[in-house]
Amino acid sequence: MRIKVLYFGRLKELAGCSEESVEVRDGSLIEDVFRTCSTARPELLQFRASLVAARNCEFAAWDMPLRAGDEVGFLPPVSGG
Amino acid sequence: MASGYPHDRIEVTREPIPDVQIARGVRGEANGAVATFDGCVRNHSHGRSTLYLEYEAYETMALAKMREIAAHLHSHFAIDRVAIVHRLGRLQIGESSVFIAVSAAHRAAAFDACRYAIDTLKKTVPIWKKEFFADGAVWADGELPPVPAETPTRKPAS
């Protein structure tokens, strides 16, 4: 299934793009998508502990199962205001 | 998105924030107080002189989270109208990055709700600030928003 992935802040600079479409197995979790995205860019892995994930604009646990067409955001610590 | 509070104003913008207009916009005839918070760009950070800032957002989610804050204010404080406007893009020293206005019959609720709104925005709204200095740029240290706990039953037994 295809998942839309969004990167922000320093993660966007590291990933080299703000969004991409990735193919993962049906039943994949957010964690699996992050691992897939990190395959081509292992440097993303060092940020794993300082990221939160969002699914369809809602904060989500890393073990949240996904559906085809879901939008997953990987968010560094927020610093608005 | 439809809101139960048609007078609320929840926005992100790339233009200078019209603070006076926003503050007047929350004022109703039943209100005795309008509390505002004006977050502005300061000229230093951790001892370094700041040249300017750049803000970026996960816009759809940021707006959703800002609406959640407004909804929380309506259900927990005796207030009338809420405005939360955050600016994105490049901001110069002294410009406003966020402006919050809350109206209420009495001042205590307006102050309390306004304080809750900015404190919560800084923890939960997906917006990021990059600070530019004469000798480089850094993403500002931020706060990691609280997330739902993982589900133990989804983990393989150990």
Image (cartoon, coloured by chain):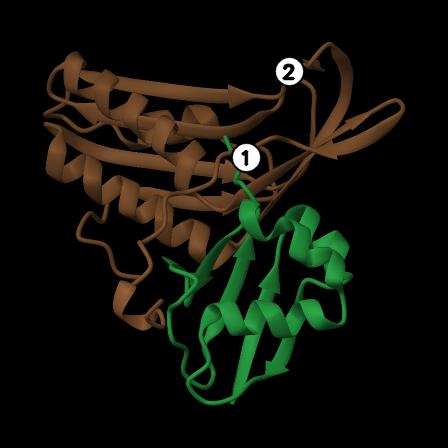
Q: Hey, which residue is sitting farthest right in the picture?
A: B135
Any part of residue B8 in sight: no
The colour of chain B is brown
Q: Residue B42 carries which label?
A: 2
Name the residue tied to disc 1. Answer: A79
| Left or right: where A41 falls relative to B155 | right
Q: Hey, which residue is sitting farthest top in the picture?
A: B47
Residue at figure coordinates x 35%, y 25% from the top left? B23
**Is label 2 in a helix, a strand or a loop?**
loop
Q: Which amino acid does label 1 sit on?
A: Ser
Q: In which quarter of the image is the N terminus of chain B?
A: bottom left
Question: Looking at the rendering, which quadrant does residue B7 occupy?
Answer: top left
Label 2 resides on the chain identified as B
Tell me if residue A71 comes above or below residue B113 in the rendering: below
Q: What residue type is labelled 2?
A: Arg
Residue at figure coordinates x 65%, y 47% from the top left? A9
Front-lying residue, B74 or B22: B74
**Cβ atoms under marks 2 and 1 closer than 8 Å:** no
The crowd level at tag 2 (other Cα within 10 Å; few <14, some 14-19, many 20+) is some
Front-lying residue, A65 or B10: A65
Task: Give the letter of the green chain.
Answer: A
Any part of residue B151 in sight: yes
Residue at figure coordinates x 29%, y 18% from the top left? B35
Residue B92, image x, y percentages: 71, 25
Label 1 resides on the chain identified as A
Front-lying residue, B50 or B3: B50
Tell me if residue B112 comes above or below residue A72 in the rendering: above
